[in-house]
Amino acid sequence: MLFNFNGGNSGGYPDGELAEDAAGNLYGTTVYGGSGVGCPYAGCGLLFELSAGKEIVLHNFTPSSTDGAYPYGGVLRDSSGSLYGVLEGAGAYGFGAVFKDTP
């Protein structure tokens, strides 16, 4: 095992592919958990980095028209290090959104 999620602030139910950078750090999402508020479950999901077996939370999702909740499907990483993914409960209309996180 590289890392065990606890369902709380470290997230829970990781979903989708992981992205890897040149240094071997891994990036992904969890559908639930995190410290975001406003979701009926324990958090709205988060974006994380695993570096040397330790988790760094990059973003806690919240259900709003400017953020979103429940990231599914993992992340993609571009050559500049930006991470992209999709959110199920998000966006101005609540039918999902695409997010970008820049380094």
Image: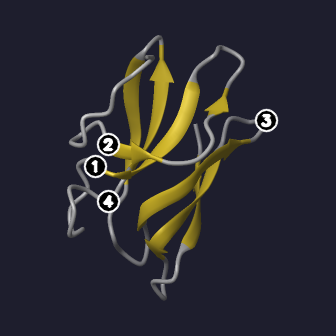
Question: Contact, CB < 8 Å: mark 1 with mark 3?
Answer: no
- Earlier in the chain: of badge 1 and badge 3, it is 1
Question: Residue 56 location, x and y as percent?
Answer: 39, 28
Q: Residue at x 21, y 61 (%)?
A: 37
Question: Contact, CB < 8 Å: mark 1 with mark 2?
Answer: yes
- Earlier in the chain: of badge 3 and badge 2, it is 2
Which quarter of the rendering shows the N terminus?
Answer: top left
Q: How many marks?
A: 4
Question: Contact, CB < 8 Å: mark 4 with mark 3?
Answer: no
Examine the rendered structure and indicate whether residue 57 appears above or below residue 37: above
Q: Amino acid at mark 3?
A: Ser
Q: Residue at x 23, y 40 (%)?
A: 9
Q: In this view, which residue lies farthest toward the right?
A: 79
Examine the rendered structure and indicate whether residue 96 appears above or below residue 49: below
Residue topped by disc 1: 33
Measure the C-alpha gap from mark 1 to mark 2: 4 Å
Question: Residue 71 location, x and y as percent?
Answer: 48, 58
Residue topped by disc 4: 44
**Residue 89, picture quadrant:** bottom left
Query: In this rendering, which labeled residue sits more in front, label 3 or label 2?
Result: 2
Q: Which mark is residue 79?
A: 3
Q: Is residue 86 left or right of residue 92?
A: right
Q: Which mark is residue 11?
A: 2
Query: In this rendering, which labeled residue sits more in front, label 1 or label 3?
Result: 1
Question: Contact, CB < 8 Å: mark 4 with mark 1?
Answer: no
Secondary structure state at the residue bearing disc 3: loop
Secondary structure state at the residue bearing disc 1: loop
Q: Amino acid at mark 2?
A: Gly
Measure the C-alpha gap from mark 4 to mark 3: 28 Å
Measure the C-alpha gap from mark 2 to mark 4: 9 Å
Secondary structure state at the residue bearing disc 2: loop
